[in-house]
Image (spheres, coloured by chain):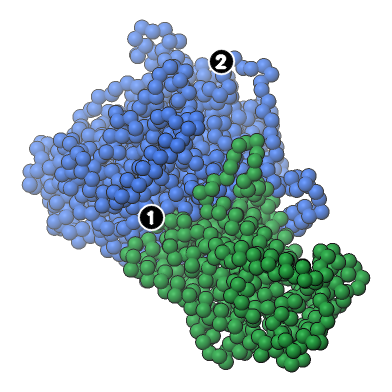
Chain colours: A blue, B green
């Protein structure tokens, strides 16, 4: 607090009522709504327009529906027609909006002045400068670095670089080079296939975090839950999922079994499994298997068990189960594909799929992933070396921030390169070190296309006018630079003429184009191609069991540090989006800061507690990270997330936490990728940092919040059985409540209450829920939830109406360790503890069974929050909407993403999940206009809409034909804290696991 | 009483001794008053910040939604209890010893309720809409929710404040008349008005004593009801550690316990500073100590019962809540409470302690501290420790805004109290005389 603020507040005593209001004490000032003077055509105020486009937040390329109100996009949802994401969307996709409306966007072209400060330029001026620089640089080295561009823009860059004699480097920090190299070793093709999780019966992930950042997380998670969900009466039981890896990441938390193999030996384990299948003829073996038989025998379970750290009979059991399922799918990725022997591990996993006869079934080459054509780390380091040697006269960067992910080498390259141009919307580290910044349009403002998978042509269209009018599509810049006529849209349409010839089916191009735009692109089926073992295949078995780092021995004294991609911030591109910063990491539940994961045994040995800051020193760099103790990591391994530690980029990202990339080697691995594991020396610093976590207790302690059933028991449950009923209320309490409710209903003569009504309810299938937290961000977007910042999260003032609770199961040390997750949101109790205690009826019961919360009536006694046993009510401690205020959540223009259907709450009022009541009322209004009743499925709350695993079902519990009513009767169904007789509207369906249930 | 009064205590002596307390204040008095006003100023500044920026400045967290302010509210309501107990119940029981102490207790009651009543207004999120809790006819057709214990609270506190104020003022009338006759200057005018024409006629005395009796009868149930209702703020909620049928008697006993302790805390310095040793004797203190002992034993019993029920009931939430209380991060708060309220009153079994004013003063201070912590433990520690959902539990760290406003409340209370003792008779003149033995009446001056 400074002197001015002190005096300002104190000055109130001298003033009268006017001064009081002027100083912000008292009700918010009234604002006026001004109608359009000249209303725009084809726009009805209050009615949303939806545009189909494509998400560009990662390489997956999910289809989007952008909801536009009054000319502003306010919500992104998955496009149900897209074969990539089936209408689902992850947290990062949702948060693209905060990139669009980011307050730190570059608004005009800028050039570095003589004294180093930025000077705004006109576009003509900027293009003329660039033109000159291109002319000067011809023949002296021109390089264009882009992110993965699998469509027209990428081709335009290719064409332009060819024209000026330069090179085009595609750089993604997580480019899965090992997958391509491993496939080349095993099958002689560097394509990245499409994995059919939905039809797999037994899934083994060798480190592949396919729900987080691996290839196509939304689509794969959706498909995974189709296989792994429990459906009573289905012939085949749910697929089993085994996770192999040194760290229990989000993907691993869904696993039925966690195999914490020694890091670097994942391939050895895969080969041992393959050996069992081949030696015991557990599957019809392909003819060419003889070529690897000898190598497999060298990796028999008994021989490798000690090095892998897993007993031979466990390996044999896994192999038997894998083969017997007749639908095995082994995938490699994540950290296993980032060791120096990552390619060999991938190849070994391929061999496992191959000998089990699954290649062509669950592993499909043909509909290949876009990253098949992704660049490699090697290409970038080569470029950096050339630039450092002065061989790059002009360096252009678009959609990549190598100065952050390759801090040492690329910064040096930037310093030595001749003239640097950044086509960046933000002043990230790379742009900040450039000479010229040409602000690109945000992907939601631009035309483009991409090919996320062979056969899928995803279109991007501008969903609104540019937020900042003086920004220009990089494609248009290149076209003007190359002297080509027309805009980038014309260029794009020109390319689509080709598709029109192939897929037009007699329609005119306009019809074809409009149709594609409407559906978000063109979706063609590509058949799977057969592959055979390649010539190099013999190389894999020899190296599949290498050390993750040369000379490293598994021991807690010299731990191996794993650098893991952050699900929210990815390689760091999400760091300037407050939604993603405040999204609790699905595993650690920490927000706004990085951490280092330490096993409890190791922590006890080092005598460190949560929040103690450790100094981690690798041969390449050092950083300081606060400890987070978790049983979900091997004792000889530490793990830190990527994404933070920006030196530039914007107000939310800058100078926050540490940059994990600084510890990594700049030298590419043998397969051209990057090693994400490094051996570190650890020193205690004596400092402490309070972690901004949402986690209170990591153990559920038998409170009945999460119920787990073993598969065998779940299968025996008959319709009408209620295994969790013993936790419910005694009959007399139910009777008393029913009588009371009836009396209330009879007494109710006022308005709505007298008529029959729906009872809105929700069913959440915990077997499907993975904890990915897409719903959390969806809720932030739909309901105008404020982000409060690290300091306030430390003090538990987060506003997240929906939180994902993650509890560990199993012993604190030793195995088996697992985790269970559950979404916790307002249960919309039938007998709600929050309602009777509110002195002013701000919390009240609506006729359709919701626990209403009238913000305007709330005086903020907070009694409701105390009395809520689920702790899902959140209080506005400050005014998060005050422009320029200390806790402002939506600095201009972020406020443009506010949903006009939802009130922005004032300081001093309570808020909570409303079941997206604005959507309920919207659907009711639509139904009334169409003179019909609400149909099941008309209403989807934003959490259910986003959920990649379709775990949430919403509907009317009083309609016996609705899906939610059927699920509420499911024998697996239970209510959380049913013993309190709160009669929640949310039915949780118990999590079903293979094997025994481990208590928390 | 009669046999304990020293021989020189006569009607005349009583009037003069008490009227002397209203004489010109010395430096010490002004220093104390300045200290109280300074504390109040601190509280006001903190409150202004709270109003401007929001409750976030206080230490609240999710799920600790009530904390120091509600602790202070219950603490001050509790303090307010002994006043009516001493003036009304003991009056009905014809306990003569009350006469020397009841005025102080009553004044303390009124000011404590005035202090307590501020906290619910301070602690709500939108303080400027506090009047929405009051049932009044309005064009919105909205009434408060009579099911909410907070509304009960409002009625309980409101009634209590009204009745205890009327009771205090009514008891003051004959005394004001007495000092009116001795006063000069502006005070004479003030007392002339506030004495509402009291002349001490038989007719007036007849009405007065009847009226006083009825008011005492009216106030008596309030002693039990007010803190019962306050306790239902907690007992009606389902928070483990709050949800107990024991709460009403437990709170009432605790309130009287803390109230009597506060009376002792206030009386000891008053007696010393105003030289009232002959009027407020050790005998009075011993009786107060006995009251303290009785209620202290009930409080100790309640602690035991609470913990026993939590264990014997077998409810995992209850058990966890009480385990957290005793051994969680707030162990120091619960052990302060246990020692000050559970162990300390045992000292009062000793007559030596009961008859030592110094010892009683020390004990009373610790009882006040203990009782503040009792409310803190019940409110904060229950909310933090076992919010049903293990994932949601969190700790709580009070801030300057909490401490500042709490300090301000002490300043506010003592400011009123200091102003009162210098302007109105802090010991009842008329009632002290009533209990004087008959022979001394010969020297009486008319009152």
Residue found 89% across the figure and 66% down from its top: B189
Mark 1, mark 2: which one is toward the viewer?
2
Mark nearer the N terminus (1 vs 2): 2
**Mark 1 closeness class: few <14, some 14–19, many ≥20 residues within 10 Å:** many
Quick check: A462 left or right of A941? right
Residue marked by disc 2: A42
Question: Outermost residue, front direction?
Answer: B203
Residue nearer the viewer, B351 or A417: B351
Along the line of sight, the residue nearer the viewer: A241 or B442 = B442
Q: Which residue is mark 1?
A: A562
Residue A574: assigned label: none
Pick the front one: B198 or A761:
B198
As rendered, which of A679 and A698 lies closer to the eye? A698
Q: Where residue A119 appears, x then y in whole percent?
A: 70, 37
Q: Quadrant of residue A304?
A: bottom left
The residue under the point 44% across, 14% down is A513
Q: Horizontally, is B251 left or right of A994 in the view?
A: right
Does A43 sit above or below residue B153?
above
Return the x and y of residue B202 as percentages of the image width and height: 77, 71
- Label 2 sits on a secondary structure element that is loop
Q: Position of residue A278 (x, y in %)?
A: 10, 45
Left or right: where A10 falls relative to A948: right
Name the chain letter of the residue that bears numbered label 1.
A
- The answer to whether any part of residue A661 appears in the image is no
Vertical placement of A218 versus A159: above or below? below
Residues marked 1 and 2 touching at CB (< 8 Å): no
Position of the N terminus of chain A, as image quadrant, is bottom right
- A789 sits to left or right of B114: left
Q: Position of residue A712 (x, y in %)?
A: 16, 47
Q: Farthest residue toward the right?
A: B185
């Amino acid at each position: 607090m400074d002197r001015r603020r002190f005096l300002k507040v104190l000055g109130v005593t001298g003033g009268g009522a006017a001064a009081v209001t002027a100083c912000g004490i008292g009700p918010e000032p009234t604002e006026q709504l001004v109608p359009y003077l000249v209303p725009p055509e084809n726009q009805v105020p209050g009615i949303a327009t939806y545009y189909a486009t494509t998400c560009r937040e990662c390489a997956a390329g999910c289809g989007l529906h952008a909801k536009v109100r009054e000319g502003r996009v306010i919500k992104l949802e998955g496009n149900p027609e897209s074969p990539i994401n089936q209408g689902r969307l992850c947290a990062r996709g949702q948060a693209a909006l905060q990139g669009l409306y980011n307050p730190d966007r570059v608004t005009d072209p800028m050039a570095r002045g003589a004294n180093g400060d930025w000077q705004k330029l006109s576009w003509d001026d900027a293009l003329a400068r660039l033109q000159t620089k291109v002319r000067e640089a011809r023949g002296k080295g021109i390089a264009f670095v882009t992110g993965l561009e699998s469509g027209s823009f990428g081709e335009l860059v290719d064409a332009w670089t060819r024209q000026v004699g330069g090179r085009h480097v595609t750089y993604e920090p997580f480019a899965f080079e090992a997958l391509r190299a491993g496939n080349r070793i095993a099958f002689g093709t560097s394509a990245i296939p499409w994995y059919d999780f939905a039809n797999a019966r037994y899934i083994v992930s060798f480190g592949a975090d396919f729900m987080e950042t691996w290839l196509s997380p939304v689509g794969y998670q959706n498909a995974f839950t189709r296989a792994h969900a429990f459906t009573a009466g289905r012939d085949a039981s749910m697929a089993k999922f085994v996770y192999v890896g040194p760290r229990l990441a989000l993907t691993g938390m869904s696993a039925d079994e966690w195999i914490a193999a020694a890091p670097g030996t994942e391939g050895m384990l895969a080969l041992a499994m393959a050996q069992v299948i081949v030696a015991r003829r557990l599957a019809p073996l392909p003819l060419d298997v003889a070529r690897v038989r000898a190598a497999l025998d060298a990796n028999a379970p008994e021989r490798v068990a000690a090095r892998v750290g897993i007993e031979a009979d466990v390996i044999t059991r896994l192999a038997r189960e894998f083969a017997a399922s007749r639908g095995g799918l082994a995938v490699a990725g994540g950290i296993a594909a980032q060791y120096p022997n990552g390619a060999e591990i991938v190849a070994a996993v391929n061999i496992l799929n191959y000998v089990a006869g699954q290649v062509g079934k669950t592993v499909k080459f043909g509909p290949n992933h876009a990253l098949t054509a992704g660049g490699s780390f090697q290409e970038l380091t080569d470029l950096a070396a050339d630039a450092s040697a002065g061989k790059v006269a002009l360096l252009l960067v678009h959609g990549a921030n190598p100065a952050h992910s390759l801090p040492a080498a690329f910064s040096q390259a930037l310093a030595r390169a001749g003239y640097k141009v950044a086509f960046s919307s933000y002043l990230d580290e790379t742009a900040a070190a450039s000479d010229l910044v040409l602000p690109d349009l945000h992907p939601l403002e631009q035309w483009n296309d991409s090919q996320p998978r062979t056969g899928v042509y995803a279109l991007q269209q501008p969903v609104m006018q540019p937020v900042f009018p003086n920004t220009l599509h990089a494609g248009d810049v290149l076209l003007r630079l190359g002297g080509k006529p027309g805009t980038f849209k014309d260029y794009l349409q020109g390319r689509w003429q080709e598709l029109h010839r192939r897929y037009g089916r007699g329609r005119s191009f306009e019809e074809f184009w409009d149709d594609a735009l409407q559906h978000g692109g063109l979706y063609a089926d590509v058949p799977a191609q057969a592959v055979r073992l390649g010539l190099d295949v013999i190389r894999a078995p020899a190296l599949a069991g290498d050390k993750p780092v040369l000379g490293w021995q598994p021991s807690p004294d010299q731990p191996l540090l794993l650098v893991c991609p952050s699900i929210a911030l990815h390689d760091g591109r999400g760091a300037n989006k407050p939604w993603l910063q405040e999204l609790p990491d699905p595993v650690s539940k920490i927000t706004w800061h990085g951490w280092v994961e330490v096993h409890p045994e190791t922590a006890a040995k080092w005598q460190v507690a949560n929040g103690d800051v450790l100094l981690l020193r690798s041969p390449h760099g050092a950083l300081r990270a606060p400890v987070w103790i978790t049983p979900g990591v091997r004792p000889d391994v530490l793990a830190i997330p990527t994404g933070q530690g920006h030196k530039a980029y914007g107000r939310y990202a800058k100078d926050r936490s540490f940059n994990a990339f600084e510890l990594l080697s700049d030298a590419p691995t043998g397969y051209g990728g990057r090693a994400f594991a490094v051996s570190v020396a650890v020193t205690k610093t004596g400092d402490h940092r309070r972690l901004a976590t949402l986690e209170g207790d990591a153990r559920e302690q038998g409170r009945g919040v999460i119920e787990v059933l073993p598969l065998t028991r779940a299968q025996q449950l008959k319709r009408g059985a209620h295994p969790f009923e013993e936790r419910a209320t005694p009959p007399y309490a139910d009777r008393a409540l029913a009588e009371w409710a009836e009396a209330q209903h009879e007494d109710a003569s006022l308005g709505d209450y007298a008529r029959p009504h729906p009872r809105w309810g929700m069913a959440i299938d915990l077997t499907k829920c993975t904890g990915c937290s897409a719903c959390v961000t969806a809720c932030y977007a739909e309901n105008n939830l404020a982000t409060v910042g690290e300091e306030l999260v430390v003090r538990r003032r987060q506003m997240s109406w929906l939180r994902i609770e993650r509890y560990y199961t199993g012993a604190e040390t030793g195995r088996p360790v697992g985790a269970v997750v559950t979404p916790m949101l307002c249960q919309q109790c039938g007998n709600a503890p929050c309602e009777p205690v509110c002195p002013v009826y701000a919390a009240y019961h609506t006729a359709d069974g919701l626990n209403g919360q009238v913000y305007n009536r709330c005086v903020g006694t907070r009694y409701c929050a105390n009395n809520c046993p689920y702790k899902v009510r959140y209080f506005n401690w400050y005014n998060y909407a005050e422009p320029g205020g200390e806790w402002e959540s939506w600095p201009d223009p972020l406020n443009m993403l506010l949903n006009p259907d939802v009130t922005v709450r004032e300081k001093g009022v309570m808020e909570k999940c409303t079941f997206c009541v604005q959507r309920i009322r919207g659907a009711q209004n639509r139904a009334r206009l169409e003179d019909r009743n609400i149909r099941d499925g008309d209403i989807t709350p934003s959490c259910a809409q986003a959920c990649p695993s379709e775990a949430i079902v919403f509907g009317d519990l009083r309609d016996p034909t609705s899906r939610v009513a059927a699920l509420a009767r499911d024998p697996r169904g239970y209510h959380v804290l049913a013993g309190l007789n709160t009669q929640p509207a949310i039915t949780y369906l118990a999590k079903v696991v293979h094997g025994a249930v481990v208590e928390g | 009483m009669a046999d304990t009064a020293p021989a020189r205590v006569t009607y005349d002596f009583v009037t003069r001794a008490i009227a002397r307390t209203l004489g010109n204040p010395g430096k010490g008095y002004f220093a104390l008053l300045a200290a109280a006003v300074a504390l109040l100023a601190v509280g006001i500044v903190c409150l202004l910040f709270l109003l401007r920026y929001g409750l976030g400045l206080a230490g609240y967290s999710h799920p600790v939604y009530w904390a120091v302010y509600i602790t202070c509210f219950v603490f001050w309501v509790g303090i307010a209890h002994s006043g009516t107990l001493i003036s009304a119940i003991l009056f009905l029981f014809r306990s003569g010893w009350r006469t020397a102490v009841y005025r102080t207790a009553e004044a303390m009651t009124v000011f404590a309720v005035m202090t307590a009543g501020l906290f619910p207004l301070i602690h709500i999120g939108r303080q400027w809409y506090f009047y929405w809790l009051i049932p009044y006819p309005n064009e919105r057709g909205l009434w408060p929710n009579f099911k909410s214990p907070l509304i009960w609270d409002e009625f309980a506190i409101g009634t209590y404040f009204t009745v205890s104020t009327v009771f205090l003022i009514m008891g003051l009338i004959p005394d004001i008349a007495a000092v009116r006759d001795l006063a000069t200057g502006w005070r004479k005018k003030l007392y002339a008005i506030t004495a509402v024409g009291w002349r001490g006629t038989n007719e007036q005395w007849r009405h007065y004593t009847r009226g006083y009796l009825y008011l005492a009868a009216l106030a008596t149930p309030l002693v039990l009801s007010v803190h019962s209702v306050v306790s239902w703020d907690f007992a009606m909620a389902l928070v483990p550690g709050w949800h107990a049928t024991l709460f009403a008697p437990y709170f009432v006993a605790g309130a009287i316990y803390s109230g009597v302790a506060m009376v002792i805390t206030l009386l000891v310095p008053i007696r010393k500073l105003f030289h009232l040793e002959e009027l407020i004797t050790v005998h009075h203190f011993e009786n107060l100590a006995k009251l303290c002992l009785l209620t202290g034993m009930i409080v100790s019993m309640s602690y035991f019962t609470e913990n026993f029920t939590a264990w014997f009931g077998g409810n995992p939430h209850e058990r966890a809540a009480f385990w957290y209380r005793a051994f969680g991060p707030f162990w120091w708060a619960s052990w302060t409470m246990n020692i000050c309220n559970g162990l300390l009153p045992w000292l009062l079994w000793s007559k030596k302690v009961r008859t030592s004013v110094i010892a009683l003063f020390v004990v009373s201070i610790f009882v006040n501290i203990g009782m503040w912590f009792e409310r803190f433990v019940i409110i904060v520690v229950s909310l933090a420790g076992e919010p049903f959902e293990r994932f949601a539990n969190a700790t709580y760290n009070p801030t300057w805004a909490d401490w500042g406003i709490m300090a301000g409340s002490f300043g506010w209370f003592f400011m009123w109290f200091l102003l009162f003792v210098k302007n109105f008779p802090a010991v009842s003149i008329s009632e002290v005389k009533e209990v004087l033995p008959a022979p001394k009446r010969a020297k009486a001056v008319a009152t």
